[in-house]
Image (cartoon, rainbow, N blue to C red):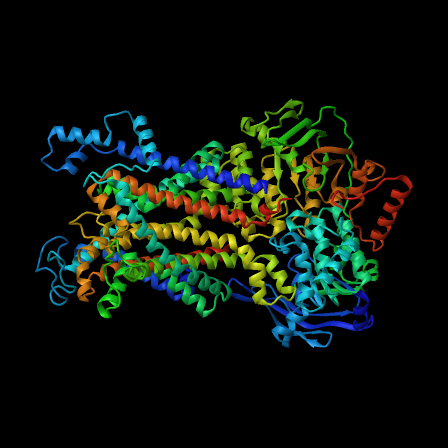
Amino acid sequence: MNEFIKLLKKAPPTAIFGMVVITIYVIVAIFAPFVAPFSETEIVGDQFELWGDPYILGTDNLGRDMLSRLIFGARNTVGIALITTAFAFLVGCFFGLLAATLGGWVDQLLGRIVDVMMAIPTLVFALLLLTIFGTSVTTLVLVIGILYSTSVFRLARAVSMNVVVLDFVEVAKLRGEGLLYIIRHEILPNILPPLVAEFGLRFCFVFLFISALSFLGLGLQPPTADWGSMVRENATLITFGDITPLVPAAAIALLTVAVNFVVDWFLHLTSGLKD
Amino acid sequence: MHAILTMIIQRLGLGLITLIAVSFIMSVAIEFLPGDLAQEVLGQSATPETVAAFRAELGLDRAFHTRYFEWLGNVLTGDLGTSLANQREISELLGTRLYNTLFLASIAAAISVPIAITLGVLAALYRNSLYDRLVNIFTLSTISTPEFFVAYILILWFSVTVRIFPSISDIGPDLGFWEHVYRSMLPALTLTLVVIAHMMRMTRAAIINLLASPYIEMATLKGVPRRDVIIRHALPNALAPIINVVVLNLAYLIVGVVVVEVVFVYPGLGQLLVDSVSKRDMPVVQACCLVFAITYILLNLTADILSILSNPRLLHPR
Amino acid sequence: MADNTNTQRGTKGDVLLEMKGLKIAAMVEEEEIEIVHGVDVTLKRGEVLGLIGESGAGKSTIGLAAMAYTRGGCWISGGSINFDGIDMLNASAEQLRDLRGKRIAYVAQSAAANFNPAHKLIDQFTEAPVLHGYSNRSAAEADAKELFGRLRLPNADTIGFRYPHQVSGGQLQRAMTAMAMSCRPDLIVFDEPTTALDVTTQIEVLAAIRDVVEQFNTAAIYVTHDLAVVAQMADRIMVLRHGNLVEEGNTREMLAAPKEEYTSQLLAVRTFKKEHQLEVTETTPLLRVNNVSASYGTTPVLFGVNFDVHKGQTVAVVGESGSGKSTTARVITGLLPPSEGTIEFKGQALPPDYRNRSKDELRQVQMIYQMADTALNPRQRIREVIGRPLTFYLGMTGKQREDRTRELLTMIEMNPDEYIDRYPTELSGGQKQRICIARALAAEPELIICDEVTSALDQLVAEEILKLLDRLQSELNLAYMFITHDLATVRAIADEVVVMLRGEVNDSGPKDEMFTPPHTDYTDLLLSSVPEMDPDWLDNLLEERKRLAEEEGRVLKAADN
């Protein structure tokens, strides 16, 4: 714990900024119903009311309170991005570790499948799949999760490969240890730092990706408050010089910047400690 | 030369296999279409007869492999089928759209590639300087920003606050070249900003990696001036990584246009794709995806081959 | 061309380089640490100075400081450097650039990494002379060919037109020496130039470097960890330790009568010899490698390898890189099933693949690796590292396991209370190797395969490890299969010697017999190539080889020369 505080003290301002922002987002997302002045979906005023009292950020194209939707959006957009990333990691790490430890034809086969999947641009692939399966939250999580698991697979495989070739894994093999022991005790503890960093980065990509889909009208469906679709729904305001639709977009950008800053610092730390 | 030739042929073969796999996936996709799709496309008034006719149109009443090879054969002869939504020939629909998209991507590439590489190399050379840190913060921020955010900010500045560029890209068939460029300026700038950050970071990383090589130290210890160290010793070896960075980002550009096209109502392939997805117009989605995938695969193939060609170990085998 | 530079060069005996109170600092984990603590170095024209020490002594850092250059993260924090009247620390970047490559040149350890892969050798050779205005392109090219010839590179006229990856390591190292010579500098810094080479290749490179330095009356700083090598090369030696000077003196005098304790330790390093020589009595060997052939994929790497290891005996398997000695170990452990032949343990054939071997079969043969760093999981405490085989093979748990772990730590001379809870990263290189030994012992094996176990260690530490292994052998009646390229180790610890060459056993026999020629050409070449402390050793060896070639027609030469 002391070590951790010492580390925090040495953190660069960008990382501290990032951590503060992430903490605020998390608190807002968890306590959304208590923080938000109005409900997520209820129409409370006229369309496009200006900023002021009682609608601090005005109202949207249907007359719902912008600030409340922004707050609930934190919950929906960030929450789904987190679940999707976690799913992508589960799938990617599992197969990545399998490919690295088993090698041989398993590795070859998985590698080829991922190659083909990555040969199709993610957005295009996602659009194709969403056309077929529709845009419910579950399909969204599954489709995006699987598409992003390919890059997790590559990373997990690559970092475990680096560990698998080390002599201490050979020692365990020659001792007669089983596959599970080797993965759990010899490999996993050694690939955790890069995977944690990758989780942060992947989260950003998934988050941006879901926002983009929602913006295109193909992600989270109304009336759920979601930052991407909020931008789209209110985009016309821009042409009148009103920046309201930029607020949810900025909220997206701020969170990803924050996560990226923290990951950047974390990467710097772990790479520095290795030497 | 023999080894290189085999490698290139190998890569081409792999690319071809990937293409076939992709086309296969596209066809299988149709297989999974849920039953109520016809209803959704045709509306509530659909009678059983029209639904059956719709299924026949998609070929769902015939065996899968027959359909696949028929479709593949048609694609190879340029026949991409007809749109479900408006019964138009897809190849006709695609032609101008593809041209528009490539036009937009080319402008963005022409602006971003030189700037990104120059700035990236400079950041690597003056590593840890104030400039480098600013670049790092800037690129991290840009990467973290959704494309539509950048797009709307540009609209706010350049077509609302100061009215220089149109916020909607009204591209018709009879536009002159420069008029086309002018009307595509905002989407191109958006793409440029998004791509530059990626490219700069990757270029910087590639060069820094290279500068740590012992032969760079050796050149310095031979008294070679810094400029020559970079030009004569680093650059020939940096070619492969930089080519990779550029091509990867070009591929990203082509796909990244989707969101940008929607924001600016730019009549490109991305816009068509998104429209068709919301209408669930499967043949069009299929065709668009195929075109995107082919472009993507071709670009990656080019990167692979170029980096093989710039590797002295392969160029001059033992 | 050599002549006109000799005139501009001062007379032999003038001071060329003087570093006074040299201090160098480094940034380690965001803290400033001094790594060289005020060392004085004086070098006269035409003199060869050897800088010797173990890792962390600061010898390379000091060598590079002679060019006023430091590696990333380091800087010169104090003292002065005077090169032929030029104050290097206050010289402009332009002045330094002009000196480097022209009047002071550098030869690095790994020629393969230090040549730019994108350019032909000749282009890299001519770069400095053309750049510094020392000569023009065509003259430099002609000079390159001449120097290549002087350094006894084969095909001196054409070899320059190859790319670095097309030339072997020993040849590249000589080409780099030629490149350093291209402007006929006053001083060359050699940074472990032969460390990465095979021992038979090393001889030729050493001889070539020495001759050319002598011919052009070039001063040199020769950095190495190997006292026997520096004894052949240097006029004067500085012994360094932890960034401090230990002792300085004329080579012959120092070797004959070292003043400091540390120097005598370094000198004594190759004198350890195990006392007991084992008489083999039983007829069934512990391990029999029976006519084993193996291949990686379709590439055959071993061809009918035969040898035995008896109980309590040490068999040294020697050979250069690529000779197949480590592959043999992989076949024995079952990592690489042989394509032909069998591995027999106590007369019983072992299953070829380790996955088919029983726990007990696996337990009896243990392995210790070259890099203790990678042989220990950095995320496991010592308790777990040693305790796991105890639980796995012998079913020990709880207090029994804890007690045995502590006992094993005591056996390898490490204090259990201090070390049992540590992570490998908190140990020194020698300590890590000890832990690996303890882990192998925990399985209570009868045979331990030692794969280059001392090669990555400093010489003094390596010697301690050898002594430990020797003691354990007599206490526990262990058999060792000792894979090594270092013949000094063989001399110290082997009972039997197996010489391998290109995947075959070239020769084998009891140690004393093997070190007495004549044997096969290769065995004699290999065994005679081990540098000795005697400063005349290289001369005598070259003379002897010349005589052999002339009188008996036996040419003892490394393959790539």
**Image coordinates for residue C318, horizontal then vertical, percent:** 72, 39
- Left or right: residue B67 versus residue C222 is left
A51, A23: nearer the viewer: A51
**Does any portion of residue C244 appear in the rendered image?**
no
**Image coordinates for residue A103, horizontal then vertical, percent:** 49, 35
- Left or right: residue C552 versus residue A244 is right
- Left or right: residue A200 versus residue C521 is left
**Does any portion of residue C183 appear in the rendered image?**
yes
Q: Is residue C399 above or below residue C197?
A: above
Q: Which residue is painted at 65% across and 51% down in the image?
A: C164
Q: Is residue C218 above or below residue C510?
A: below
Q: Quadrant of residue C364?
A: top right
The extreme top residue here reads C348
C174, C3: nearer the viewer: C3
The extreme right residue here reads C551
- Number of labels in the image equals 0
* Image quadrant in which the N terminus of chain A is located: bottom left
Q: Quadrant of residue A97?
A: top left
Q: Is residue C393 above or below residue C49?
A: above
A26, B177: nearer the viewer: B177
**Image coordinates for residue C136, horizontal then vertical, percent:** 71, 65
C553, A86: nearer the viewer: C553
- Left or right: residue C187 versus residue A156 is right
